Image (cartoon, helix red, strand yellow):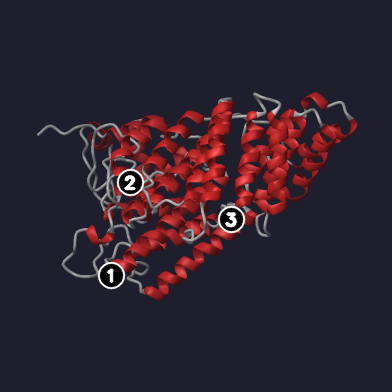
Amino acid sequence: MTREPNARLADLFGLAGWSKGELARLVNRKAAAMGYPQLATDTSRVRRWIETGETPRDPVPKVLATLFTERLGRVVTTEDLGFGRQRRTGRRKSGDSLPWAPDRVAGVLTEFTGMDLMFNRRGLVGAGAALAAGSVLSNAMYDWLHTDPALATDAPRLDTPLNADPAGFDPYEAAPVGSTEVAALERSVDIFRAWDASRGGGLQRKAVVGQLNEVGGMLSFRHPDHLQRRLWGVAADLAVLAGWMSHDVGLEPTAQKYFLIAAHAAREGGDRPRASEALSRGARQMVHLGRPDDALDLMKLAKSGAGEETLPRTRAMFATIEAWAQAVKGNGQAVRRTLGEAEELFVSDKGDVPPPSWMQLFNEADLHGMEGLVYRTLAEHEPAASGVAQHHAKLALEMREGGRERSTIFDHISIASSCFLADDPEQADRYARMALLSIGDNSSHRTWDRLREMYRLTGQYATSGKIKELREEIRLADPKGQGQGHGGTATV
């Protein structure tokens, strides 16, 4: 039977820019450094991997993943290279054959987090790789998200209650766990979530990824159904956090991969609303990157696949994200309609059903904070919206609880930006300085992205004494050494 080319490997090989002979030499050198001095790869073997889809023996896939990770500046796994257990040689699509089998979810999770940790230790900086989002991802995932959740009880039974494929797992780390350990993991998620909300994603990202890696090892074993579902829930929570923290520090392709893993993990645990919330994070990421159409595609998918059990408050949050994407496009009528729906949904939630832990940070302050951001964004197209933006952002500030320092910075920036758009530089200066006062204590890169966009609005007041001083202070404090936007949308 004629074998087909490995399109995944071919695509990444083209991006890396190596010759086949050069890659062969690099594999031999890297393998020796990793403790495999006997490996001898040549040009003809590299050609067969790419052109005939031949799968190299271990440890070559792991060596290749390390080489491509270092070369491309982003995490590349053996699955990304087309060497997964059930590799398809056709051109890759984001959603890939859905649904993923439970063991594949655990395997991808464990390998990706392991590579991410290795990548992070070496201090490499993520490259601006293309993201597979919007309609591409939506089309691949639509049918999958609309089927009944793949509960752990529906997964194939193994001959023994606890079983794991040792490939890819450290036998000293992967182990079955009981209810006490799962409860401790659930508590750790709350701690990480609170830290992220306070200090940003930079300082604890590696800790979250490491915890997720351990959970992936645990999921390689078969636990009793109730524990298995809870473990999948922990995996989904940690993957969303890892994705959000990655997005917060500008590791965008890495963030999107974590959001996709989180959606799969939530589905394995039978939690459709959680799977949709993970996709909504990807939509927020797309708005931040200036891709509102992709964001709207993802939100359409997230909302339609969330299931009837999704609480009104969660649907309200979804609506605010959709409204933000519409604001980027300047669709004022759609913005007002969608935010109206968000407000109605929020007040209709009577609180008789406790919100899941991942929704507890979206309270009334966050609703107003998002409305402030949305109207500030719309004010780029409709200056009259700046007054509404200030109103909501100030309400958010009044309601903010302790421990939400990053959101407070965003509120200050929203107000300052809206004031500049409303030709009120004096008040803008006051709120901009409030943001500057605390932004240095936060590890979030997104706060600086938004402050740089606010800086852009100061241009017309550059000769004014106070604003001239403000611009200089921003330039001096900016970790990138620039006080201006650097691509992307002016609305983030």
Q: Position of residue 61 (x, y in %)?
A: 31, 47
Q: Position of residue 366 (x, y in %)?
A: 61, 49
Tell me which numbered mark, 3 or 1, is placed earlier along the sequence. Answer: 3
The amino acid type, in three-letter code, at marker 2 is Thr
The answer to whether residue 167 is left or right of residue 435 is left
The amino acid type, in three-letter code, at marker 3 is Asp
Residue occupying image coordinates x 72% and y 40% = 391
SS for callout 2: loop
Tell me which numbered mark, 3 or 2, is placed earlier along the sequence. Answer: 2
Of circles 3 and 2, which is in front?
3
Q: Quadrant of the C terminus?
A: top right
Of circles 1 and 2, which is in front?
1
Label 3–label 1 contact, CB within 8 A: no
The answer to whether residue 430 is left or right of residue 18 is right
Q: Where 369 sits versus 454, above or below?
A: below
Residue that carries the numbered disc 1 in the rendered image: 224
Q: Position of residue 182 (x, y in %)?
A: 41, 70
SS for callout 1: loop
Residue that carries the numbered disc 3 in the rendered image: 196
The amino acid type, in three-letter code, at marker 1 is Pro
Q: Where 209 sits versus 69, above or below?
A: below
Q: Between marks 1 and 2, how big is the CA–CA gap?
A: 30 Å
Of circles 3 and 1, which is in front?
1
The answer to whether residue 344 is left or right of residue 25 is right
Tell me which numbered mark, 1 or 2, is placed earlier along the sequence. Answer: 2
Residue occupying image coordinates x 43% and y 43% = 279
Residue 13 visible from this viewpoint: no
Badge 2 density bin: few <14, some 14–19, many ≥20, Cα 10 Å: many
> Image quarter for residue 249?
top right
